[in-house]
Amino acid sequence: MIQDKDRKILASQDKGVLLRLSSKQKETLTNIASQQEGLNKQNFVLKKTGEEFYDFSFPVTTFKTVKFDEEVSLGLATETKDGQRSGVTERIGTARVGITTAEMAERIAEMKRIVIFVTFQIVLLGIFLAFLMVRIIMNPLERLVQATKKVAVGDFSLEVKIRQKDELGELANSFNIMTRNLRKLICEIEEYNRTLEKKVEERTKKLEEAQAFLVQSEKLSAIGQLISGVAHELNNPLASVIGFSQLALGSEVNTKTGSYLKKICSEADRCAKIVNNLLTFSRRSKPEKKSVGVNGIVERTLDLMSYQLQVNNIRITKDLDAGLPKTLGDFHQLQQVFLNIVNNAFQAMTEKAKEGIITVRTKRIENIILIEFTDTGPGIPKENLNRIFDPFFTTKDIGKGTGLGLSISYGIIKEHGGNIYALSEPGKGATFVIELPIVETPLTVEVTEKTSKEITPSFKAYVLVIDDEESILDLLYDFLKGKGYDVDTASTGQEALRKFKTEMYDLIICDLKMPNLSGQQLYNEIKKIKPELSSRIIFFTGDTVSPQTESFLKSTGNRVISKPFDLNWLLSFIQEFLISQTELKAK
Amino acid sequence: MKIGFKKFGLRLKFIITFSLLILLTSVLLSIFLIRKQAELIRNELNEKGEYLVKNLASSSEYGVLVEDTKLLSWLL
């Protein structure tokens, strides 16, 4: 629509929008449009159809130029030299365009439909992807949960199969490793449970055996104490028998009586040897390595067993190397080992046969002393050969053996730096081989070595003999008196104490074990009354020396003689002692 | 509500959470897109009207001056 400045419609489309407006609307729009200088936009709605329109209006202008004084020219202005149009702009009308918003609304609605549709698709796709993702995460997780539930009720057979290489895969892998380990552990526990009862039975059996061993040890200990007591009781009369028979032999007797006396002396010596062996065996002493002769230990062991072997028809064959050097060892421990082996051989042989032979062989091979004990018994089965040194291993009936003997022997020999092993073929007997290293020791003179040299006293001395045994007192009195000494006797400690107050002795021979006042107590009393006499005491005893007595003797430094003794040896011992005392006095 | 949500399984929790997130994001994006598009269409219409009316005003200067209705009608 085009209007002039008086709002008169100059041209319009036949179906122009404005024409369809109400007169009031038309008036309002026309007024606003004609008053606006620039572009004006207004929207309005057709009441009848409800259609919405945009009304755009723009002023139609022209240039007014004054050519002459009062002549005015309207119209297209002429251009000046600089390209500008000259003159004044004047509004001559209004151009108006009305555009319906229906198309725009249609486009917006279409766009909305598309966006909503796409959004809906995206949401659906998103939810689908969410489902997929949850499935990827949750499915293996649920499988793991199921597996853990099964594990919780004790079913470890399930393996979770997850092929993913991510954290869930690692989790499943770890879970599978865990269940595998648990399965293994449970198998082990089950296996252990199965064997536990067996082990308990074995341990119970071993405990019973250990208990039997303890009972046996207690018995042995009691027997040892009994032996010790008996030996002490026997040594005193034996000392008298040997002593008096030696005294009688020294006097004038006929040949027949002399031969009888010699037999008494020899048999009493034999008894003394047996008693001594028993004492040695029953003695409880701590291991002490000294220079020892292996042959001597073997002899002493066989002596100890000789009666038992003889009455059971077991013969002993000895092949001992006379030139065998001494070595460092504990006499008692080595004797225990030898005794153990001989005792085992004896038991094995007497079990199956009524006779047998034990061959003992000693020899030197380079720096080793080889000791072999061979028996003619049934031998050791191959399967047991490697186990015989195990603690508590025994093939003997309960009560007959504890299974500790060879084990202890093994420990003793190893402690000596040696080796012990057995060679055997079933039915062909057994050989126990002991290898002991030769350890050189400095030469020592054994002061108490008993020799039977005839010695006569070189000077006189006043000797006091103290013993509760009358026979010993009589024997020593007669013997020493006969050898030219002045001898005094005391049968109790108290009597001796009384005599010390008045008399001065060169030598005091004192028994260690006496009633009321023992040798040890007497020594302490003498030290108080006459200290110079304390060093002149020689103790003698028929018993084993207890650790307390041993430490007492060590602290005093006094000498000790064991009963029974050879009279000539005693004489030389006394003389040697008196000489040393004189030398001390001279110094 | 919180206690109720806790009762659900992990799967349901994941699905609900992801779905709500996707739905909310999509709706917000759609609203923003529709508004922006509508504004563009309106601007386009305004520009079109402005262009038309300015051209009409410029072209109809002579016709209005001389009141040549034929010419003006032809312009329309």
Image (cartoon, rainbow, N blue to C red):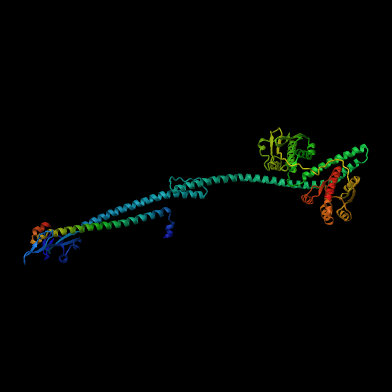
From what the image shows, is residue A14 above or below residue A292?
below
Q: Work out whether residue A537 can be spotted.
A: no
- Residue A295 shown left or right of residue B1 in the figure: right
From what the image shows, is residue A350 above or below residue A184?
above
What percent of the width, then of the height, locates residue A583? 83, 48
Which residue is depicted at the point 34% across and 52% down?
A: A124
In this view, the residue in front, A220 or A115, is: A220
In this view, the residue in front, A113 or A153, is: A113
What percent of the width, then of the height, locates residue A525? 83, 55
Quarter assignment of residue A188: top right
Which residue is depicted at the point 16% across and 62% down?
A: A57
From what the image shows, is residue A428 above or below residue A337?
above
- Residue A452 shown left or right of residue A434 in the figure: right
What percent of the width, then of the height, locates residue A322? 77, 35
Q: Residue furthest front?
A: A587
What percent of the width, then of the height, locates residue A375? 73, 35
Q: Work out whether residue A338 can be spotted.
A: yes
- Residue A33 shown left or right of residue B12 in the figure: left
Quarter assignment of residue A270: top right
In this view, the residue in front, A370 or A28, is: A370
Q: Indicate the quadrant containing the N terminus of chain A: top left, top right, bottom left or bottom right.
A: bottom left
Task: Give the number of callouts.
Answer: 0
